Image (cartoon, rainbow, N blue to C red):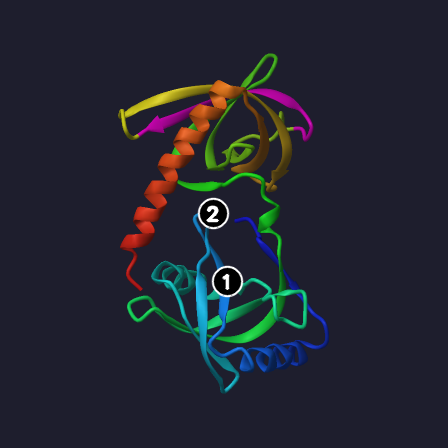
Amino acid sequence: MFQYYDKAVRGTENEDKMVILQFLSGMIGQTFSFLNYYKEMPVSYDATLLSVENEMAEFAIHEYQAKVISLERKALIYSHAKSPFSEDMIGEAFYVNSTRKRAILCNFAYARIRSDMRRFVRVQLDRPVEVDLVFEDDILKGNVKDISLGGAAMSAMSSELLVPGRNVGLLLKLPDSQTNSVVEVEAEATVVKVVGENAPFTCIIEIHSDKHSQQQIAHYINQRQVEIIRELKDINS
């Protein structure tokens, strides 16, 4: 999974926690922006700080935010305009209730959110999507794990041909839920990196699509986003 933040330390971990709590204590009633990820899709809604006591902070939050916090057991909070520090914050979930739309966070620390560096929305796939990487004299078959307009992560049983920087042909076989068919999408791609010492290997590729193939991929991503939002709505927490 994409690591969408880095932990940051200004003093000791305990000193940082106490500074954050002191700041939050003076911000009761203020609005903060939360961030979590569900199947690679950002979930970000505003939350209102209700109280701070016993080194914990209670927030009134959106139902969807609560559901994802209950899964991740943490929440990122964007740096507030009134904050005396530039870093974002992260808190661990002590209590979450999506019905009451409440979350109590503890063990606060500084963080630097870096998922904003992403140029494209990425979605995680629940069902395997077949992909062929076409080389000069060979074809490597695999399955897409997640995808965006600019790239994808795929699993493959061999890494011999997967040399970072190598340009390859790409054939994606994207399911279309509206027509109950499979759409074959051709594009060019570049191998970015390969992860893993044993099969299955994870290969990260950058996709260089033309206007037509980009539209096809965008259509699939939009369908997948709708499915993920529907799944999120149905989660009970």
Residue at image position (54%, 82%) is 25
Quadrant containing the C terminus is bottom left
Position in image of residue 115 (x %, y %): 58, 50
User: Circle 1 sits on which residue?
Assistant: 33
For mark 1, does the 10 Å Cα neighbourhood hold few (<14), some (14 to 19), or many (20 or more) residues?
some
User: Circle 2 sits on which residue?
Assistant: 40
Q: Secondary structure at mark 2?
A: loop
Q: Quadrant of residue 96?
A: bottom left
Name the foreground residue: 109 vs 27.
Answer: 27
Number of numbered markers: 2
Q: Quadrant of residue 183?
A: top left
- Above or below, 77 relative to 147: below
Q: Secondary structure at mark 1?
A: strand
In this rendering, does residue 180 appear at all? yes
Q: Which mark is residue 96?
A: none
Position in image of residue 236 (x %, y %): 28, 61
Name the foreground residue: 232 vs 135.
Answer: 232
Position in image of residue 154 (x %, y %): 51, 34
Tell me if label 1 and label 2 are in contact, CB under 8 Å: no
Q: CA distance from mark 1 to mark 2?
A: 18 Å
165 is within the stretch colored magenta: yes
Bounds of the magenta segment: 163-176
**Circle 1: residue type:** Ser
Residue at image position (61%, 41%) is 197
